[in-house]
Image (tube, grey):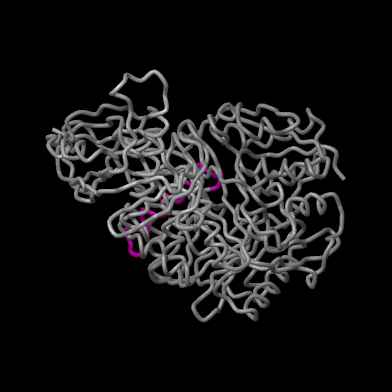
Amino acid sequence: MFKKILIANRGEIACRVIKTARKLGIRTVAVYSDADKDARHVELADEAVHIGAAPSRESYLLADRIIEACKKTGAEAVHPGYGFLSENEGFAKRVEEEGIVFIGPKHYSIAAMGDKIASKKLAGEAKVNTIPGYNDAIDTAEQAVEIAKGIGYPVMIKASAGGGGKGLRVAFNDKEALEGFTSCRNEARNSFGDDRVFIEKFVEEPRHIEIQVLGDAHGNVIYLNERECSIQRRHQKVIEEAPSPFISEATRKAMGEQAVALAKAVKYQSAGTVEFVVGKDQSFYFLEMNTRLQVEHPVTECITGLDLVELMIRVAAGEKLPLAQKDVQRNGWAIECRINAEDPFRNFLPSTGRLVRFQPPAESLAAAEPTAADDYGVRVDTGVYEGGEIPMYYDSMIAKLIVHGRDRNHAIALMREALNGFVIRGIHSNIPFQAALLAHPKFVTGEFNTGFIAEHYAHGFRAEDVPHADPDFLVALAAYVHRRYRARASGISGQLEGHGVKVGEQFVVVTLAADGQHVHTPVSVTDFQGKTGSSAVQVGANSYRIDSLSPLGSIRVEGRVNGQPFTAQVERGAGKNPLALRVQHNGTQIEAMVLSPLGARLLALMPYKAPPDMSKFLLSPMPGLLVDVAVQEGQQVQAGEKLAVIEAMKMENVLFAAQDGVVGKIAAAKGESLAVDQVIMEFA
């Protein structure tokens, strides 16, 4: 077994590998860029080596720096994680040539299967069903349009070296094919250093189901069941689960055996994933093979009780697989939500900056490590910490929230409660969107495909897309917490006699309706039988007994309502109104002012202040790099015309004109780093 390994990655996956290495008694070496000098993976590793500037092409993608760090520290092996150099044939070969073990497949397997074009040809030769398409690199956008028309729209334009949703577009007409080809090439060149692009038929209403395989150097290959990865937004996975709620036992077996046959054909060693697109009739087609560890590997670990990182390390050290196909378990149900730094209410734009608060839900899966397959609970895999920075240079995922339940309904319930308790402040996250997906009737019944998000959230995500099953509970909780604050304030000594704080029992909770109007809800709150933290709350005809011992000032509030457990988030002055309480539960958020009846009557007399008109300005919707300004001062523009391009978290975001107008002044220059809501240009 190795004594020291280097992790050629960052963030969550680097921390994940370090955790297993520690369990095995292996020392670890982290590498880091300028942006990651204070990162969590650097702190956790036994040693750390600086390898370059913040952009990945100047640090994490530099094979020479990685190999130099191995030699400097005496690392015997390299674990590449996912992304960056993990599927780079040249890197794997060079590592091997330097006498360092690559904890992953051999370079020839990566060459055969990591290249999307080569892998589709190989799959065809092996008589594996493949999707119709043009599997050679395409040279020009015009050629791409002709090929797309020949295949028949819609088509999928994909970068040969792509992954993680990068370098991928779906085109439904000539215009989209022309623009999609150019965007794919640019993203592929920037992210992978390889701008080859191919086109294949886009199968409508498909499901994305993948098979986890594991091989060793002794010719043994097994499959570890499947993962359902159909809940995707812009071709990036949002929620993954294992097993799939869709396929039959016969389909599972057929897909698994085909995946194993494909892996054996390329003498595959290590963990890998064979991805399939599955039709409504459970017919399936080979999509691609990811010759690395997948982001969503924890759900497989939960239902099988296996540590995939440990098995990768053991296989790389020359050990045989410790189990045969007949020994693979499938126990319970696991779901993973990717917690991303993005604002779902602003079209999922990236959100970078400091994590002012980062309090994941309490973990309950045996120290959050893979364990027995019947151990149910919550696991959090992350590479960040409270007070740390989310940089603009890398992907947007800040944590993976994983639950393991007895069955699918139990897992969904566990995940909803875990999301309720996940506190993130300072940046925006997609937690409200995740909550909405988990509550959607079609998700609950398992009736979805890869077009689910595009179909049900075609116009983006809005607050009304996640209605609460009992909105009066949010009002009751606001009143309950407010009264606890009043009770504490009433006990402060030294108050002026006759003017001390009175607790009261009658309140009016003032919230904002969708049309911006104030809604006044009378509420009564009384102590329940004198018990600490226990109150009876009346909201109209609804009665709530709320019990909680969560300390005042804590954002996460845990307790019971009418005997049922709940977790919610409540904080003062967090929104636009410093006098309001922000209450969040099951993805729904309200801002509530809890006033006395007199205070509510006086509020109703306050004049309305209209917000300023910003329609004459183009504002940066996120922090990022202004890579292009497509117009000039004095230029006439039409609605829908391209104005500027901002790059953040490895993605290009194009800003378009919302209406016809004339560019009056350009306030930001190409190459400038922008802050949120910074003015880019002004219209005359």
Q: Residue at x 68, y 72 (%)?
A: 256
Q: In the depicted view, which residue is nearer to us: 174 or 79?
A: 79
Question: Quick check: can you spot residue 264?
Answer: yes
Is the magenta region chiefly helix, strand or loop?
A: helix
Quadrant assignment for the N terminus = top right
Q: Quadrant of residue 652?
A: top left
Can residue 237 be seen in the rendering of this structure? no
| Position of residue 86 measured from the top left corner of the image (x, y, whole percent) | 66, 47
Please report the bounds of the magenta region as a residue range: 171-194
Residue displayed at 17% across by 45% down: 659
Please state if 309 lies on the left or on the right of 564 as rendered: right
Whole-percent x, y for residue 145 in the image: 38, 61
Q: Is 122 covered by the magenta stretch? A: no
Q: Nearer the viewer, residue 546 or 426?
A: 546
Is 175 within the magenta? yes
Q: Quadrant of the C terminus?
A: top left
Left or right of residue 469: residue 603: left
Depth check, front residue: 128 or 399: 399
Residue 440 falls left or right of residue 398: left
Question: Residue 200 appears at what percent x and percent y?
Answer: 48, 66
